[in-house]
Amino acid sequence: MTNTQEAPVSVLSNIEVQRLDHLGLVASAIDTLQLVERIDKRLPISDSRDSNVTHGQRVKAMIINGLGYTTHPLYLSPTFFEGKDLSRLLGAGVEAKHLNAHALGRTLDAIFSYGTTKLFAEIAFEVGQERGLLGHSVHIDTTTLLLHGEYSEAIALAQKEKDKDEVNGIPLTDAPTPALGYSKAHRHDLKQLVMSLTVTGEAAMPLWFEGLSGNSSDKSNFQDSIAKFEAFKESINVVESFLWVADSALYSKEKLQSSLIKWLTRIPQTKKNAKQLVAQDDKDIAWETSHNGYKGIIFDKLEVDERWALIYSEQAYQREHITFERNINKALAKIQTELKKLTKMVFACEKDALKAPKKWQKSLKYHSVTFTVQRQTRYSKAGKPAKGTQPDIIEYQLSGIITNNEQAQNKQRNQLGRFILGTNVTDDESLTAGAMLATYLEQQDVERGFRFIKSDEFHLDGIYLHLPSRIDALMMVMTLSLMVYNVSEHEMREALNNQKENLPTQKGKKTTRPTLRWVFQLMQDISILKMEGIPSHVSGINENQDKIIRLFGKNACAIYGINM
C-alpha cells in the first residue's frame, strides 16, 4: 500500500502585491478638494455606456495618472491603473477597463461641451473661497504646448463642419486652433496651442485657465482673458477686487485705461520716458535698498495716473555686465577688421578720403574712430626714376585711432540690471518700490506652474490627441492637476508649521517647506497586500511616511489604513 500526500500549498502564491506609494496622497488631496463631486454636479452621466464610472471619477483618474511620475501619458489611464487597488483610489466597483480611451474621450467631450474655462473657473473659485486661498493679486501669463502631428485633418474637419457648429455632437467654433506661431520652446517646426494661466495667493492656486489658438499674441490674449475673468467674477457675485500682474505685454495705455482694472506690470523700455529713466546716472538716484540685492525708487506722474518704480537687481546686473563687456569686445574686434580695410583704400583727394568713412562712423555704437589723411606720392613709370624727376602721382590714404565712446558706454552701463514697474494704483502709500517689486516677483508662480505642466516627469507636454476640442479639455485637466499639486503643497507646509513638525531633506537635514515632489519620493515602497478571503493590508509604512499621511488628513489615513 502506497501512502499519497498532497503537496503543501504555498501561502505566498496566493498573495497579490500592489504598489500604492504616493498615489494615495494624490487621491486623498482630490477628495479633500471635493473635485469629483464638483465635476459630477456639473457633468451628470447621461449615457448608459458611462454607468460604471462618473466623469468626476475619470478626471480624478487622469489627475492621479498625471501626478504618478510615470511614462504613461495622462490620457492613457487604463495602462497606468492595471494592477492597482482602484477601490482605494477611485471608489468601489471601479476597474481599469472602465477607464478605456472611449470613456475618457467622452469625458473630455463633456468637459468641452460644458465649457473648459467655465468649468475650471467655477471649481477654482469655489475651492479658493472655501479654503481662503484667494490673494490680493492675480498673476497672468501664457505658454505654448507643442502638438506632434500636422492636425490638418482635424482642422479641415472643423472648418468643413463649421456651419453645423459641431462634429459628433461637439461644438467646434470655440475650440482653439493648432497653428504655427511664436514658439516659446523654439520649435517653430511644430504646431502649438497657447495656454493662458492666472494664479493667486500664497498657494499660487490656478484660478483661471484658457486654451488659445497657437498663433495668438499675448498683447491681445491678456486683455481678452482679463475681460472674460472680470465678467465671470461678476456673474458669480464675487466681490473681491484683484490687482492684475503681468509682464510688459499687458502694457497698453489705451486698453488699460478702458478696462477699469487695477494693474501692475513691467513698463516696456521702448517708451521715451522709460528710456530716459533707466539711463540716469547712478549718482543722481536716491535708491532705497530692498532685499536680495534689489534697490528701487518711486517716480510718480512720469505718465498721467501712473506710478513707476525704477528697480535695480544686482544679480541681473552681474549677468548683463558679462554680456555687455563681451559685446563691446566683439564690437572692437569688428571695428579693427573694418578699419584695416579702410586704411588700405586709396583716394584721389583728401576730401574723398575724409568722406568715405562718415556713414560707417555713425554706425559705431560703443567706440569712436578719429581719422587723419596721409598724403602719398609715387611715380607712374616703373623702374628707377631719372635724377631730378619728381613723383607725378599724388594719392591719399586714411589712418585711424580707435577710442572708447565713454558717454555711449556709460549710458548703456547705467541700464544694466535695471527695469521699470508701473501701476495705476497711485493713492496707496504702502505700495512702495519694494512692495511693487515683491508683488511682481510673485509672477514666478505662474512660470513654475508652466514648468510643472510641461515637465517630463509629469509627461503632460507634447499632446497627441486629434480633435482640438479634446486637446482643450485635456489642458483643463492638466491645470486641475496643477491645482491639486499647489494647494496640497501649501496646506502640507501649513500643517507642518502648525504642528511644529519637519521632514528630512534630500541631504538629511530638516525642513518645514519640502516640495511635494520630494514628499512623493519619500512615499516610495508602500504596497497593498491582498489575499483571498482576507481584507487587504497596506504594508511598508515607516515613521516619516506615517507623519506625511497624517499631514494630509482623514482622507489619506483612510486610504492608507491608518487610524487618526
Image (cartoon, grey):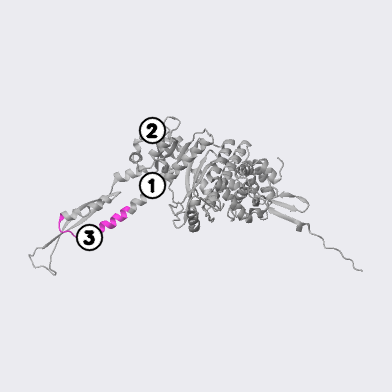
Residue found at the far front of this picture: 164
Which residue lies at the image location 52% right of the left edge and 46% below the top edge? 449
Residue where numbered disc 2 is placed:
305
Q: Alpha-carbon distance for marks 1 and 2?
A: 34 Å
Q: Are marks 1 and 3 in contact (CB under 8 Å)?
A: no
Given residues 291 and 450, the one toward you in this image is 450
Q: Quadrant of residue 377?
A: bottom left
Residue 291 appears in the figure: no
Amino acid found under the numbered disc labelled 2: Asp
Residue 161 appears in the figure: yes
Q: Residue 518: horizontal and vertical position, in percent?
A: 59, 47
Q: Residues within 10 Å of mark 3 (few under 14, many from 20)?
A: few
Q: Earlier in the sequence, mark 1 or mark 2?
A: 2
Given residues 527 and 380, the one toward you in this image is 527
Q: Are marks 1 and 2 in contact (CB under 8 Å)?
A: no
Residue where numbered disc 3 is placed:
344
Of helix, strand and loop, which one carries label 1? helix
Q: Residue 535: horizontal and vertical position, in percent?
A: 76, 49
